[in-house]
Amino acid sequence: GAGVSQSPSNKVTEKGKDVELRCDPISGHTALYWYRQRLGQGLEFLIYFQGNSAPDKSGLPSDRFSAERTGESVSTLTIQRTQQEDSAVYLCASSSTSGASPLHFGNGTRLTVT
Amino acid sequence: EDKVVQSPLSLVVHEGDTVTLNCSYEVTNFRSLLWYKQEKKAPTFLFMLTSSGIEKKSGRLSSILDKKELFSILNITATQTGDSAIYLCAGGSQGNLIFGKGTKLSVKP
């Protein structure tokens, strides 16, 4: 596609439920990133995939968070047993290489945990 | 620990003013410094800087990197209300991109 696509755009869930967020990167982009942005805050790194290398999971805040990527395409971010503090916008970005190329961001998924 | 610090955190100016946004970084295996503009949703790319002392310009926006002092500035001249946004700075290494908290710029008519 022309850009990074994320779905759903908005998600409201009850505390304790699991949620799955999806990201379709730009075709051909080998690097894929997930960030979290709380209201009025900067971007908080969560996880990074580069090709077939082991992902950098150093930013995942707890073991309730996990992410997968199928080859160099779709990625899903899963949050288990959601908490109110998980409410944020989850942004996905992709780039053609890592670190030395601009990231192209999707419009994000706004997650609200009630 | 890698970090990127932006200042000021927020700024209110009037149309026509010139503003300078600051970004300092400590990033292991640093490769590039990026600036993004975030209005409502997705941050949009402004500049990527890899070499010291070479100014990049795009219209009224310009940016420069100092790799010795580990900082970058983003200048906006003749500001317009459409420049109101959060400006994000990020330091890139071989993998991760570390973002600062952003500078919220408000341009009043």
Image: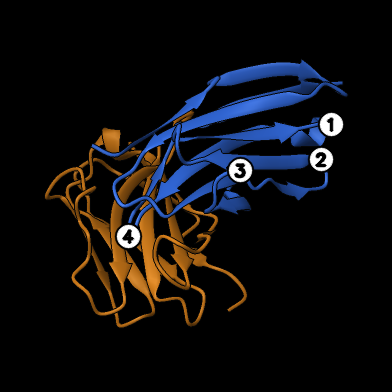
Check chain identity for marks 4 and 3: say if they share one: yes
Distance from the alpha carbon under mark 2 to that under mark 4:
31 Å
Distance from the alpha carbon under mark 1 to that under mark 2:
10 Å
Is mark 1 in CB contact (under 8 Å) with mark 2?
A: yes
In primary-sequence order, the first of circles 3 and 2 is 3
Of badges 1 and 2, the one in the foreground is 2
Residue B19, position in %: x, y? 72, 24
Distance from the alpha carbon under mark 3 to that under mark 1:
27 Å
Q: At label 2, which amino acid type do we have?
A: Arg
The residue that label 2 is drawn on is: B60
In primary-sequence order, the first of circles 1 and 2 is 2
The residue that label 1 is drawn on is: B80
In front: B83, or A112?
B83
Q: What element carries label 2?
A: loop
Check chain identity for marks 1 and 2: say if they share one: yes
Q: Is mark 4 on a helix, strand or loop?
A: loop
Check chain identity for marks 3 and 1: say if they share one: yes
Residue A48, position in %: x, y? 30, 61
How packed mark 1 is, by other alpha carbons closer than 10 Å (few <14, some 14-19, many 20 or more), is: some
**Residue B109 sits above or below residue B91 on the image:** above
